[in-house]
């Protein structure tokens, strides 16, 4: 069990009790599917974790915590790396676990490539719906440590405005009594997407499952060949992403929401900021987070700024 003093604070963040106990899954649940970037079949088994353990991946007997300390920049996804082992596209799974309150979880992952040092989480339909369903299938329970003791859950509260930006893209966090996210995107090259904004009501698991988790990843059709030439989206198809053509609009309608691309950005943001979690405590900062034209790199930069760290490449 971790002590409160072990939590890393900064001039921007203070940790406060939530009035709840840390939770974990009530049982194990398994899902298999194709990975978006590698195109390989991947199997993930979610299992209960001890209080204070947090969320961590097990891959070929190697443990990689779902933490900013092991997050690295990679194109179009969030990647965790440790001692030469790499796990890509963790953001949708971590987003669902954070939103559902699965504070401690052992995530066992196995790729179809029995010898490789790289793994990737399955993409399914491009949303977090399958992971939300997996959590609901087994349910939650109070997490306990090796001595059978529970741990009160802490949450990071933003104390003053923080912002990061690159060119005309930015992500900011303002002090707030509740978690709220406002996100804007702009794709002038694809008029069917165009400019969109979406703002959550105070975010909880019900809001997440109904308004955020169903939103699918998206791409611009004219950029697909370039991404595949770069070794990305080898497993991409119309079944695991919504695809928009600059001239023809959406190629695989209908959308689940008129602003589905914008909502998916919030899904990604929650997954990326979940890496702020420490010792099984809440990762998503209690703040009003406002983002415009952000992405995985900028999300991580905000989290590291809140922690008082420099951006890692």
Image (cartoon, rainbow, N blue to C red):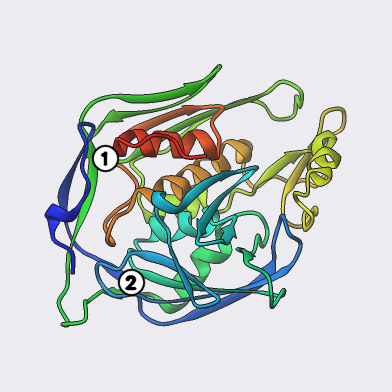
* Residue at the (34%, 75%) spot, across then down: 49
Measuring from the top left, give residue 162's x and y in whole percent: 32, 26
**Residue nearest the viewer, comparing 29 with 65:** 65
Q: Name the residue under label 2.
A: 24
* Residue at the (39%, 61%) spot, across then down: 100
**Residue nearest the viewer, comparing 135 with 305:** 305
Within 10 Å of disc 1 (Cα), the crowding (few <14, some 14-19, many 20+) is some
Disc with the residue nearer the chain's start (1 vs 2):
2
Q: From the viewer's perspective, tell me whether residue 187 is left or right of residue 209.
A: right
> Which residue is outermost to the front?
83
Q: Is mark 2 on a helix, strand or loop?
A: strand
Q: From the viewer's perspective, tell me whether residue 166 is left or right of residue 286.
A: right
Q: In which quarter of the image is residue 281?
A: bottom left
**Across the whole image, how many numbered discs are drawn on residues?**
2
Q: From the viewer's perspective, tell me whether residue 101 is left or right of residue 269.
A: left
Within 10 Å of disc 2 (Cα), the crowding (few <14, some 14-19, many 20+) is many
* Residue at the (61%, 41%) spot, across then down: 260
Q: Quadrant of residue 194?
A: top right
Measuring from the top left, give residue 38's x and y in whole percent: 73, 59
* Residue at the (64%, 43%) spot, across then down: 76
- Which image quarter is the N terminus in? bottom left
What mark, if any, has residue 254 been given in the picture?
none
Distance Cα–Cα, label 1 vs label 2: 23 Å
Measuring from the top left, give residue 87's x and y in whole percent: 57, 60
Q: Is mark 1 on a helix, strand or loop?
A: loop
Measuring from the top left, give residue 172's x and y in whole percent: 39, 27
What mark, if any, has residue 178 been given in the picture?
1
Q: In this view, does 58 lie above or below 257?
A: below
**Residue nearest the viewer, comparing 112 with 215:** 112
């Amino acid at each position: 069990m971790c002590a409160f003093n072990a939590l890393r604070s900064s001039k921007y963040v203070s940790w406060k009790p939530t009035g709840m106990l840390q939770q974990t899954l009530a049982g194990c649940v398994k899902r298999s599917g194709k990975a978006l970037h590698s195109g390989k079949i991947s199997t993930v088994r979610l299992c209960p974790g001890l209080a204070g353990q947090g969320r961590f991946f097990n891959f070929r007997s190697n443990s990689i915590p779902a933490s900013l300390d092991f997050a690295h920049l990679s194109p179009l996804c969030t990647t965790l790396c440790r001692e030469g082992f790499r796990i890509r596209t963790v953001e949708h799974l971590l987003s669902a676990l954070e939103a559902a309150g699965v504070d401690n979880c052992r995530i066992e992952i196995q790729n179809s490539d029995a010898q490789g040092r790289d793994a990737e989480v399955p993409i399914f339909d491009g949303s977090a719906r399958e992971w939300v369903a997996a959590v609901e299938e087994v349910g939650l329970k109070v997490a306990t440590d090796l001595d059978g003791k529970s741990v009160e859950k802490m949450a990071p509260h933003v104390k003053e405005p923080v912002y990061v930006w690159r060119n005309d893209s930015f992500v900011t966090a303002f002090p707030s009594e509740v978690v709220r996210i406002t996100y804007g995107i702009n794709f002038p090259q694809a008029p069917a997407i165009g400019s969109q904004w979406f703002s959550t009501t105070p975010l909880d698991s019900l809001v997440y499952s109904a308004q955020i988790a169903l939103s699918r990843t998206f791409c611009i059709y004219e950029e697909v060949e370039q991404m595949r030439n770069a070794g990305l989206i080898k497993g991409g198809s119309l079944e695991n992403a919504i695809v928009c053509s600059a001239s023809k609009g959406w190629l695989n309608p209908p959308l689940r929401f008129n602003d589905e691309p914008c909502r998916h950005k919030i899904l990604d943001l929650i997954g990326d900021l979940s890496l702020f979690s420490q010792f099984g405590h809440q990762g998503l900062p209690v703040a009003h987070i406002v983002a415009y034209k952000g992405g995985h790199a900028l999300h991580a930069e905000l989290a590291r700024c809140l922690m008082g760290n420099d951006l890692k490449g």
